[in-house]
Amino acid sequence: MNGLQAGVWYAIAAEHDLPKDHVYRTMLGGHELAAWRSTDGGVHVWEDRCPHRGVRFSLGEVVGDELRCQYHAWRFGKTGACTFIPAQPDLKVPRTIHAAVWPVALSAGLVWSGIEPIGAPPALPPGAVLRAIPIARPAASVAHALVKEPLAGLALVLQPLDETATIVRGIALDDDLVRADHALLALRRRLEQAA
Ligand code: FES
């Protein structure tokens, strides 16, 4: 299914992509996801679709420990449960009104999610998390190229966006961040030109 394997953790964002009050939009294996951070620093990853009328949560707003949908301002708590419907302020919201919540883990400066991931995210060496580089190639092609020609000085993780595109995130293993960033851009050029 779109390059996604069940049981695997995938990096879907860097922790620095999720400052306070920001809802981060991304994709994983064709699934649109919204990630946000509550006031306790916890990160939440949900299907990017409000259960009311399907509006993207990533258009919404973080209000304290809740995410407020942009359209009718329904509010959802950290568990994904709807907590308040402004048009019916006295209603005890049914527990069935719930965001589709994805697993989440924080590790190595990255936010990880996946379909029923097993265990902990992969251990990565310490280093600076570089900017995400989208590449218009399937994750399998990117992985194959990296096996054939590994990039020195970098640990890499792949986020399959859908069947056609991948985000590559690098962790620089030395202080030369510019060289590491250029190496990722060169990888993108090489793979996209070869397509
Ligand atoms: S679509 Fe989200 S509250 Fe209506």
Image (tube, helix red, strand yellow):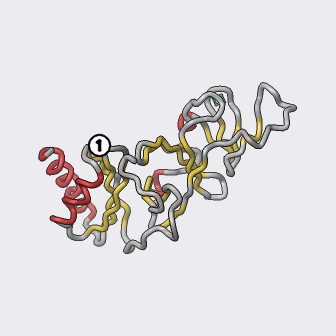
10 Å crowding of disc 1: few (<14), some (14-19), many (20+): some
Q: Is mark 1 within 8 Å of ligand 1?
A: no
Q: Position of residue 106 (x, y in %)?
A: 52, 63
The residue located at (70%, 38%) in the rendering is 75
* Residue under the image location 24 percent in, 70 percent down: 153
| Image quarter in which the C terminus is found | top left
Ligand 1 positioned in quadrant: top right
Looking at the picture, tell me which residue is in the foreground, 37 or 141: 141
What percent of the width, then of the height, locates residue 181? Answer: 25, 57
Q: Looking at the image, is 176 positioned above or below residue 93?
A: below
Identity of the residue furthest to the left in this view? 194
Residue occupied by mark 1:
164
Q: Identify the element where label 1 is drawn.
A: loop
Q: Residue at x 79, y 39 (%)?
A: 94
Q: Quadrant of the rendered structure where residue 10 is?
A: bottom left
x and y percentages locating residue 1 in the rendered image: 40, 48
Tell me the quarter of the picture where residue 175 sits.
bottom left
Residue 29: x %, y % from top left: 41, 47
Query: Does residue 38 lie above or below 109 as drawn?
Result: above
Q: How many marks?
A: 1
Residue 185 relative to residue 85: left or right: left
* Residue at left offset 37%, top offset 62%: 129
Q: Is residue 4 left or right of residue 113?
A: left
Viewer-side residue, 162 vs 193: 162
Disc 1 residue type (three-letter): Thr
> In this picture, is 151 found above or below 83?
below
In the image as oriented, which residue stretches furthest toward the right?
A: 90
* Left or right position of 101 against 64: left
Taking depth in this image into account, of 90 and 8 the one nearest to the observer is: 8
